[in-house]
Image (cartoon, rainbow, N blue to C red):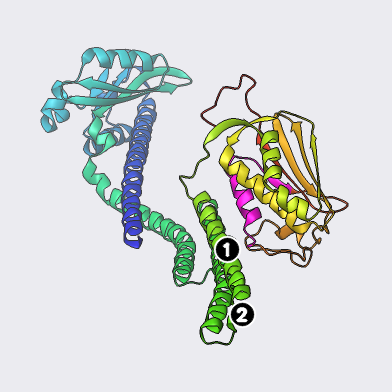
Amino acid sequence: MFARIMAVVTAVIVLLTIAFSVLGMVVVRDQQMTARLDSLRQEARDIAWLAAQNDLSSGMILFGYTGDTQRYLQRRAAQVHERYGAYLVVVDRWGRVMDNFSVTLSDNPDFAASLSTMELNDAISRVLAGEEVSLRTMADSGPLFTVGVPFQVNQRVLGAVLIQTPAQRVEGGWEELVPRIVLMAVLAALVSGAVLFFLVRRIMRPLRQLTGAARAMSAGDFTQRVETERMVPEMAEVAGAFNTMAARISENEHNRREFVANVSHELRSPITSISGFVQGMEDGTIPPEEHPQYLHLVRTETQRLSKLISDLLALSRLEKDDAAPQWSDFDICEMLRRAVIRRMGDLERKHMDVACDFHADPCPVHADADRIEQVVVNLVDNAIKFTPEGGRITLSTAERDGLCAVTVADNGPGILPEDRPHVFDRFFTADRAHTAGKGTGLGLSICQQILAMHHQSIRLEDTAEGAAFTFTLQRAAENGNRRDSHA
């Protein structure tokens, strides 16, 4: 992973260097061209000032004048030509002209041949009108730059100075820009490299923390967490997701260990009893006349063990990813009546009363009938088991916002406040509250899992006496047609 990150960083540095170099090249070249045009324009102004020192209004011929000003003007014209390879022309209002055409023709015949009299005359006309011009035109030999300024005496325009030069002498060749471009590329690489170094360093620090925490978790330490402070938002989000995952894994691991411990304990108890009773009968510790009594105990423990295994298998099947309800429409009130009839023997032995308070009767629901029957049987069995003799069980139904609410209540000793948050935990048995009977502690967990599969809920109600459990189911469609899916 580090190698991939470094490859990306290197690629980014190269791309940034190229981008900054190209941008710098354009900027430098533009600045160089602007500076040279300004210099060329200033040269034209200086020559115009020198030309204005000759009193053209007195009829002196500009280029026939042999004074110091004239000689200096000619020297400046020669310097401009040498520096820019430029064609220089000075013209006054009376048509008198000074230029360096012969020198230009000698040094650069192609450039001299490309000079356009029409373009020069047009530029001269604009300058004699008092305008400074800066033009870029195209000739046979290539692009040209023309600058022109007027020269004046007593605020009167007496003539014009025009300098025309090949564009490459102003824009400059690439060879002149190479050293500056190389310098800018080096600076761009250093700056982008430094910025990316600190950025990658900032990113890599939490990545190293995540790597270390992940390795510790792979070794079995599920307490690892990553600090999210001083992280970039994206990395903080990743670290937060990692911490959430670690917390869930830690919780699942705790639940797994607790589940294994509970299963081991629940299995060990009946197996130990069965083994002890059988061994006692085999070695004569238990006399033959008492064998029927202990065989009955062995059968009871075997039934208990079978019930535990059945509940574990049921819970395992419910937790499978492909577990899905077999949807159908049925009357939940009728199912409650059948559950009471099946337990009539136990109810009569304990002299218990059963009351049915069905506000919606019939109450058609859309659910998996077999699994909901398992919920009903579990709740009714618990009510019978934990209600003392002569007690009362109440079964009720009601409609709530398109749902059917089913409640199974008893008037037994109830559930202690400290036990209430744990009644749906696996292997939890509230023996401190319900002193009679034994259970696996999986029944309510199975009920909760079945209702969750139906996207419904089951809860323990707050009651003044006894215990009451309420679960909800989706009402069936009024036309009674079977629905293939559940919203």
Q: Circle 2 sits in a helix, a strand or a loop, which is it?
A: helix
Q: Identify the residue at horizontal 31%, vertical 46% (top origin).
A: 18
The foreground one among 216 and 14 is 216
Q: Circle 1 sits in a helix, a strand or a loop, which is it?
A: helix
Kindly indicate the quadrant of the structure image that contains residue 36. top left
Q: Is residue 232 visible?
A: no
Residue 453 part of the magenta-drawn span? yes
Q: Identify the residue at horizontal 35%, vertical 62% (top origin).
A: 2
Q: Identify the residue at horizontal 57%, vertical 67% (top origin).
A: 299
Residue 311 part of the magenta-drawn span? no
Q: Quadrant of the N terminus?
A: bottom left
Q: As displayed, is residue 13 above or below residue 280?
A: above
Q: Identify the residue at horizontal 27%, vertical 30% (top origin).
A: 66
Q: As displayed, is residue 104 above or below residue 216?
A: above
Q: Amino acid at mark 2?
A: Glu
Where is residue 170 shown, x and y percent of the image? 28, 35
Where is residue 175 shown, x and y percent of the image? 21, 45
Q: Pointer 2: what residue?
A: 289
Where is residue 39 shown, x and y percent of the image? 36, 36
Q: Is residue 463 visible?
A: yes
The foreground one among 127 and 53 is 127
Q: From the viewer's perspective, is the residue at label 2 or at label 1 nearer?
A: 2
Q: Amino acid at mark 1?
A: Gln
Tell me where the magenta segment starts and ends, as one range.
440-459
The foreground one among 271 and 313 is 271
Where is residue 126 shown, x and y percent of the image? 37, 14
Give the alpha-carbon distance from disc 2 to disc 1, as whole Å: 23 Å
Q: As displayed, is residue 308 above or below residue 330?
A: below
Label 1: how many Cα within 10 Å (few below 14, some 14–19, many 20+): few
Q: Pointer 1: what residue?
A: 303
